[in-house]
Image (cartoon, rainbow, N blue to C red):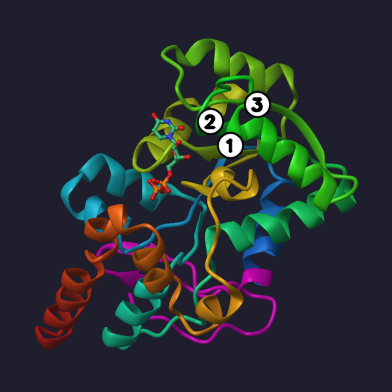
Amino acid sequence: MAGREAPEGEIAVRVDVLGVAFDNVTKKEAVDRAMALLEEDGPHLAATPNPEMVQRAGKDPEFAQVLSAAQLVIPDGIGIVWAARILKRPLKGRVPGIDFASALMEQMARTGKRLFLLGAAPAKDGQPSVAEQAAANLQKACPGLVICGTHDGYFKKDGPVVRQIRDARADVVFVCLGFPRQEKWIAAHGGETGARLLIGLGGSLDVFAGRVKRAPAWFQNHGLEWFYRLASQPSRAGRILKIAPFLLKALGARLRGG
Ligand code: UDP
């Protein structure tokens, strides 16, 4: 499906990038859409796929199905924007999941919506869990934000976690378990939590907790966050460099007229 320019206020049709359909939205449009979803009965899933996730969806039909059922699919990462351009279906731009989450939290603080943080490493050696540390930092950074609970991402049983979220009366859950587990978890358990919007956000809690640093603004603004990560976290090189075959696949699809 090719994209089209949407009139102001209307969400554009989805743009297909190698089998995953993305909403062609700016960050503000994504947040407006998320806030609108909070007014409807849930659960709703918001996903923030990067090239690696699109590649995975190509090999994992269950994951592809979950992504296609999501109410909001945001292009996280410059690789998605480049691939869309190669496919001649340009997107308005990238919307990193973590930026979307930050802007959404500002709106949630204004409207009294309740946020639950799920995922990342548990408490260790007297240090709080990543989610607890993230909650403390976010409450400082975003006055008025209601964080109604946290849970680490290394649990064996889903039931107690689901109950904790439901008892906390969460409106929104940031689910940070790594893909594709987080999206599949939302699809399987989102309804039981009672939350209206559950968002798969990968490693965002590590960043909010201050345990992983994001690239400086210059790298982000020039579409070079991936390069910064490559230099600062060489252990992830294999993952980051998967962007090359992804773009070649987009080129192949374009040459075949797909
Ligand atoms: N994680 C988790 N439970 C698990 C495996 C991973 O909570 O069983 C967390 C991990 O601690 C990290 C996040 O999931 O905070 C995944 O981060 P990554 O940057 O790898 O995100 P991805 O690229 O997978 O979206």
For disc 3, the neighbor class at 10 Å (few under 14, some 14 to 19, many from 20) is some
Query: In what element is the residue under mark 2?
Result: helix
Q: Residue furthest front?
A: 125
* CA gap, disc 2 and disc 3: 26 Å
Judged by its main secondary structure, the magenta piece is: loop
Mark 2 and mark 3 lie on one chain; the one further toward the N terminus is 3
Tell me if label 2 and label 3 are in contact, CB under 8 Å: no
On residue 128, which mark appears?
3
Query: In what element is the residue under mark 3?
Result: loop
Query: In what element is the residue under mark 1?
Result: loop
Q: Amino acid at mark 3?
A: Pro
On residue 43, which mark appears?
1
Q: Which residue carries the number 2 mark?
A: 190
Taking depth in this image into account, of 184 and 157 the one nearest to the observer is 157
Point 50% across, 30% down: residue = 121
Point 31% across, 59% down: residue = 234
Mark 1 and mark 2 lie on one chain; the one further toward the N terminus is 1
Q: Amino acid at mark 1?
A: Pro
Is 217 situated left or right of 188 in this image?
right
For disc 2, the neighbor class at 10 Å (few under 14, some 14 to 19, many from 20) is many
Mark 3 and mark 1 lie on one chain; the one further toward the N terminus is 1
Quarter of the N terminus within the rendering: bottom left
Q: Which residues are magenta?
A: 1-28
Taking depth in this image into account, of 184 and 2 the one nearest to the observer is 184
Residue 191 spot, x, y in % from top left: 55, 28
Q: Amino acid at mark 2?
A: Gly
The image quadrant that residue 145 belongs to is: top right
